[in-house]
Image (spheres, coloured by chain):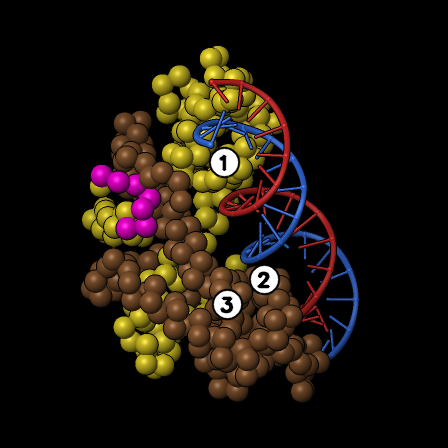
Chain colours: A brown, B yellow, C blue, D red
Amino acid sequence: VPDPLPFDPIYEARRQWRAQGWTDAAGGMAAVTSVMRAQQLLLARVDAVLEPFELTFSRFEVLALLAFSRQGELPLGKIGRRLQVHAASVTNAVQRLEAQRLVRRRPHPTDGRTVLAQITPKGQRVMRAAAAALNAVFAGMPLGAAELDALVATLQTLRHDAGDFVRA
Amino acid sequence: VPDPLPFDPIYEARRQWRAQGWTDAAGGMAAVTSVMRAQQLLLARVDAVLEPFELTFSRFEVLALLAFSRQGELPLGKIGRRLQVHAASVTNAVQRLEAQRLVRRRPHPTDGRTVLAQITPKGQRVMRAAAAALNAVFAGMPLGAAELDALVATLQTLRHDAGDFVRA
DNA sequence: AAAGATTGAAGCCTCAATCTTC
DNA sequence: GAAGATTGAGGCTTCAATCTTT
């Protein structure tokens, strides 16, 4: 971790933006860069916690989704839609998880086109251990329950507006 | 853009998390995934707007920083600290900007170790045009000024807690 | 030694093209 | 033709190692 700045670069940028006469867009600009930077920090923290398990947040999400599913297995396409990532990303994540013996892939019994990813017993164990470690991070966030809910709700508006899902 | 889900995957995941008994961490988990997903959507939208200018948000940020600087030039290290990205990312961005003739690099007059990136007149023009296009995106966000400010403030708490800067 | 910059490696993401199966 | 999956390309990020200058 490098030396921290003696001021908030986002607030400084917003000031600059306003000074340029773009006052109507300065708030949006600050919001966008805030989200970008917060994502970077959160991802770094989460990935650091997951590192001992040889997992990344992307792969953890796949593992958790499988662990929560009824049969412990899901078609790759369904995983991608649920996690909102490109099919190529799912292929990559599942290949790595399979190499780690956390997931097994098998052909769909009736549809020859689709591939199923199935979590293994080892995958179940690793997922639980990793989730426990992550919970410490989530529970340790410097925000209260009300603030967290407000944050999630605000970002939900954003995601909904972007057409991420329907039926809020 | 693929078909949207008929439900919010973040809310669904939070429900699952709570059903597993991890109620104290469910809020944090939802907040983290919300930020991740919002970042993805915002970046995609911003990059799409910047595409006609052959710019990416990363490179736009460098260009804007230079445009706002007193002399129109800054040492690479300073750019990295201000934008909070790794030195390697700055090197990469400046190299691309130089290839586009939007920036020129020149040695520091007194310190032989540092390299200065200087915005060119063409860079100034492109930056202004790109900023105008971006302003439409920022101004068109589905959130009011108060909501934007609350979002920025909440994320500022997060960033400050992560040691991103001091002196809120 | 310390600071600034660059290079190469590796991870993740997206898109476009391709192949197989329905 | 449409759907599901995979591959290859390109972009961005980080880290570790290296080189030059202070």
Which residue is rendered at x = 32% and y = 50% of the image?
B162
* Image depth: mark 1 or mark 2 in front: 1
Q: From this view, report whether residue B153 is shown above or below residue B72.
A: below
Say if residue B155 shows up in the picture.
Answer: no
Residue underneath mark 3: A53
* Same-chain check, marks 1 and 3: no
Residue closer to the observer: C3 or B6: C3
Residue underneath mark 2: A89
Residue underneath mark 1: B87
Q: Which stretch appears magenta? A: B161-167
Query: Is residue B9 in the magenta section?
Result: no
Residue closer to the observer: B24 or B41: B24
Amino acid type at mark 1: Ala
Q: In the rendered view of the protein, which quadrant contains the C terminus of chain A?
A: bottom left
Locate residue B59, reporting x and y percent: 50, 35
Which residue is rendered at x = 67% and y = 87% of the image?
A109
Query: Is residue B164 in the magenta section?
Result: yes
* Image depth: mark 3 or mark 2 in front: 3
